[in-house]
Amino acid sequence: MKAAICQPQMGKEALLGLLSAKSEGERAFVFDAAREARHRAFGNKVFLYGFLYLSTHCRNDCAFCQYRRSNSSLERYRKPLGEMLEAAGRLAADGVHLLDLTLGEDPYYVEPAGFHRLLELVSALKETTGLPIMVSPGVLSAEQLVRLREAGADWYACYQETHNRDLFTRLRLEQDYDRRKRTRLEAAGCGLLAEDGLLTGVGESAEDLADSILDMAREPLDQVRAMSYVPHESTFPSTAGDTLEERRAHELLAIAAMRLVMEDRLIPASLDVDGLEGLAMRLKAGANVVTSIVPSGCGLAGVASKDLDIENQRRSVAAVVRQLGVLGLEPALPGEYRAWVEQ
Ligand code: MD0
Ligand code: SF4
C-alpha cells in the first residue's frame, strides 16, 4: 500500500452530492476539482499499462460478461507462452510502464494442478521485459497469492464491481462476496499492490457508489477504478441513460469522486470501454493511468470491448501519447513508475 491510508475523508453526504451532479456546470466543477487533486499528487504525468488477455476461458458465469461460461457462441482462446512473450516484448519496446496479465478464471491456470503454468508465465514475462507485472486471475487461495508474489508479480487486481451485496449477487452469479473481498485483502497482506474496481451502469444508485468509494478508501488499495458496463448480445441490456454522456455519467463522476477522496491512489482511464475516443473524458475526470493498451496483430482481445480499436492501432502507446499531449499531459518516465511501485 503506497498511498497514505488516512486521507482527509469526505463525508457521505458531500460525496453523494458530487455523485449526483446533473447539470453540465455542476459536473464540470467536480471534474475541475478532480484534475486539481490529480495535479497535486502526480503533476502532469500519466502511467501507461499494457494489457495481455491470456485466456478467455472461464469457469464463472458473471451476468455482465461476454466471457461467461454459459456463452456458448463465443470462440475462446488460450495463448501459448511464446506468443505472450512476443506481445509483451512489443508492449515493452513501445514504452508501457506495466504489463497487466489478465485471464478468465480458467481452470487450466488457476486450479492447483495447473497454477505452476501461471507462475512460469509471470516469471518469464518479468525476466524478459523487466517490467512490473499486474495479475488479474480472479479469486485465489492465500497460498497461491504468496506464490504469485514470489514469482515476481507486483500487483493483484480483483474487482468487486459493487459493494452492495444484493447487486453483487445479481452481477457475479453464485460467487461469494466475502471471499472475493478477502482475497484482495490477503493479496495486500502478502506484499502485492492491490486494485479494486466498480462496474457502473448496472442499476447502481448514487448512494451505492458513495458506499463503494468510502469502502475502497478504508481498504489498503493502491489502485481503484470504475468502468461502465458494455452490454453484449449474451448479457443483459443496459439500464443506464439514452445518450452516451448519460451512460458514462456514473463512471466519470465515480472517477472524479475517487480522485477527490483518494487523491494519491492510481485511477485508470480504460481504453476497454470506448476505445481511444473515450480517453479524453476519463482523463478530464481525474484519471492518471491509461489501461488496456493492446498490441495489434497478436490476436489478443479486450475484456469489456473485445475488438474495439485493437487492429487499427488506436490502443497503442503512440496513439495514447498523442492524446495526452492534447490534454497537456505526458507519459511518466519508466523510472518514475518504477520508483512509485518500489517506494
Ligand atoms: C482494462 N480490460 O484495463 C482491462 C481489465 C484488468 N486488470 C483490467 C479490466 O480495462
Ligand atoms: Fe469470468 Fe471475469 Fe467474465 Fe466473470 S468477469 S465471467 S470471472 S472473465
Image (cartoon, helix red, strand yellow):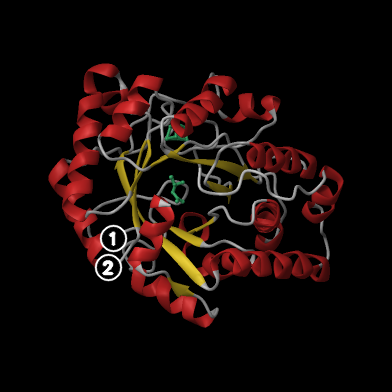
Q: Circle 1 sits on which residue?
A: 295
Q: Quadrant of residue 105?
A: top left
Of the numbered discs in the image, which one, if any, rests on residue 94? 2
Q: Is residue 323 above or below residue 338?
A: below
Give me the residue at 71% from left, 40% from top: 214
Q: Is residue 35 above or below residue 221?
A: below
Q: Quadrant of residue 102?
A: top left
Position in image of residue 292 (x %, y %): 41, 55
Q: Is residue 44 above or below residue 134?
A: below
Ligand 2 shows up in which quadrant of the image? top left
Give me the residue at 38% from left, 69% from top: 314
Give me the residue at 74% from left, 38% from top: 211
Position in image of residue 260 (x %, y %): 70, 57
Which type of secondary structure does the marked residue at label 1 adopt?
Answer: loop
The answer to whether the residues at label 2 and label 1 have Cβ atoms under 8 Å apart is yes
At label 2, the amino acid type is Asp
Q: Is residue 213 above or below residue 148?
A: below
Mark 2 and mark 1: Cα distance apart in space: 9 Å
Give 228 or 36, whichever is nearer the viewer: 36
Residue at the far front in the pictured view: 343
The total of numbered circles placed on residues is: 2
Is residue 235 rendered to the left or right of residue 213? left
At label 1, the amino acid type is Pro
Q: Earlier in the sequence, mark 2 or mark 1?
A: 2
Report if residue 141 is visible in the image: no
Position in image of residue 172 (x %, y %): 55, 28
Is residue 151 rendered to the left or right of residue 65? left
Which type of secondary structure does the marked residue at label 2 adopt?
Answer: helix
Report if residue 20 is visible in the image: yes
Give 123 or 164, whichever is nearer the viewer: 123
